[in-house]
Amino acid sequence: MKVEKCDIYAGERLLIRQGSFVVDSNRLNLLIGNNGVGKTVILDKISNLDRNRPAEFIGFPDAKDIIYQTQGASFIDEVTVLTTLKLFGEMAGVDLVNHLNLPEIISKNMEARFGNLSGGERRFIIIWASLQVPRKLYLFDEPFANLDPYHVSQLMKLFYSELATGKTILLTTHQFEELIPDRTHITHIAHQKVDFDGTMTDFMMHHGDDLQNVLKEIAS
Ligand SMILES: Nc1ncnc2c1ncn2[C@@H]1O[C@H](COP(=O)(O)OP(=O)(O)OP(=O)(O)O)[C@@H](O)[C@H]1O
C-alpha cells in the first residue's frame, strides 16, 4: 500500500505537496507531525468513507476491508461492555466475552454501561475489540489519547503482537515511548511535505534518538 506523488487537499486547501509514502505490512506504521498537518485527512482518504480516495493512493483495500477508529471512541452509550463485546464478537466471528486474554480493564467493567466508562476505558475497549475483527487494514487516529502509561504500554504490545498475525496497522500519534525501532515505520509530515518515510531505525540514524525533540526542531 502506498501513496505516490499526491497533492493532498482538505476541501480546497492544499495540505501536502506531492506526498509519497508507503504503509508497511510488516511494521507498525506511524503517521506523525504537528497538529493540523493533515494526518486525519490522510486517514479519511485511505478509509475512502466519503468515496474521495485519490488515484495516487495505490493498493489500499476496499472500505469494507478496513477498520477505521476515529479520534472519539464512540459506541452505543446505553449498552453494557458485555453487549459491546458480543456485538464486536459477532462481527469478528469469535466469542470475545470468553476471550482467553481479555485485558483486565475490560473484564472488570463487564456490567458497566459503555457510556459510563472513562474516556480511556472506552478508547481501550473499542481499539482492543476492533483489532479482533478480521480486516486487511486497521486505521487508528490517536489511539493512545487519554490512556495512562500502563495502558499505553498494553496497547503498544498489542499492536506489535497483532502485526505478527498478518494485520496491517496505521496510526497517528504524538506518543513515542515503547516503540520498537526495527518494527516501526515512520511517515513524518512537516512544512506541507512528507519529510521522512522509512523505518524508525533509519529515522534515528539520520536524526538522533530523541524523537520528540527532533520532531520539534524539524517542525520549527
Ligand atoms: N473539509 C475540510 N475543509 C477545509 N479544511 C479542512 C477540512 N478538513 C480538515 N481541514 C483542515 O485541514 C487541516 C489538517 O487537519 P487534520 O485533522 O488532518 O490534522 P491532524 O494532522 O490530524 O492534526 P491533529 O494532530 O491535531 O489531530 C486542519 O487545519 C483542518 O482544519
Image (cartoon, grey):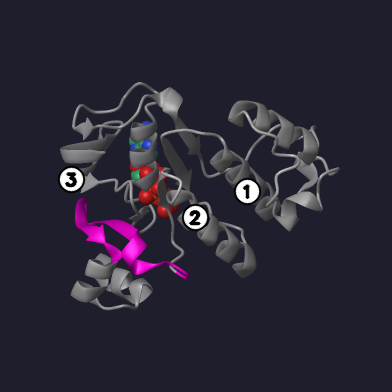
- In space, the residues marked 3 and 1 are separated at their CA atoms by 30 Å
> Disc 2, disc 3: CB below 8 Å?
no
Q: Which mark is residue 123?
A: 1
Give the mark, 3 or 1, whose residue is nearer the N terminus. Answer: 3
Residue 77 or residue 171, whichever sits in front: 171
Kind of residue at badge 2: Ser
Q: Residue 157: x, y in percent?
A: 53, 61
Closer to the camera: disc 2 or disc 3?
2
Residue 205 or residue 90, whichever sits in front: 90
Q: Label 1 neighbourhood size at 10 Å, few (<14), some (14-19), many (20+)?
A: many
Q: Residue 32: x, y in percent?
A: 35, 57
Q: Is residue 165 left or right of residue 84?
A: left
Kind of residue at badge 1: Arg
Q: Is residue 184 magenta?
A: yes
Magenta-highlighted residues: 177-200
Q: Is residue 149 above or below residue 107?
A: below
Q: Label 2 neighbourhood size at 10 Å, few (<14), some (14-19), many (20+)?
A: few
Q: Residue 46: in sight, yes or no?
A: yes
- In space, the residues marked 1 and 2 are separated at their CA atoms by 19 Å
Give the mark, 2 or 3, whose residue is nearer the N terminus. Answer: 3
Q: Which residue is mark 3?
A: 20
Q: Which type of secondary structure does the marked residue at label 1 adopt?
A: helix
Residue found 51% across the figure and 34% down from its top? 134
Q: Is residue 112 left or right of residue 118?
A: right
Q: How many marks?
A: 3
Instruction: Find ligand 1 in the image and state its quadrant.
Output: top left
Q: Which type of secondary structure does the marked residue at label 3 adopt?
A: strand
Q: Which residue is mark 2?
A: 161
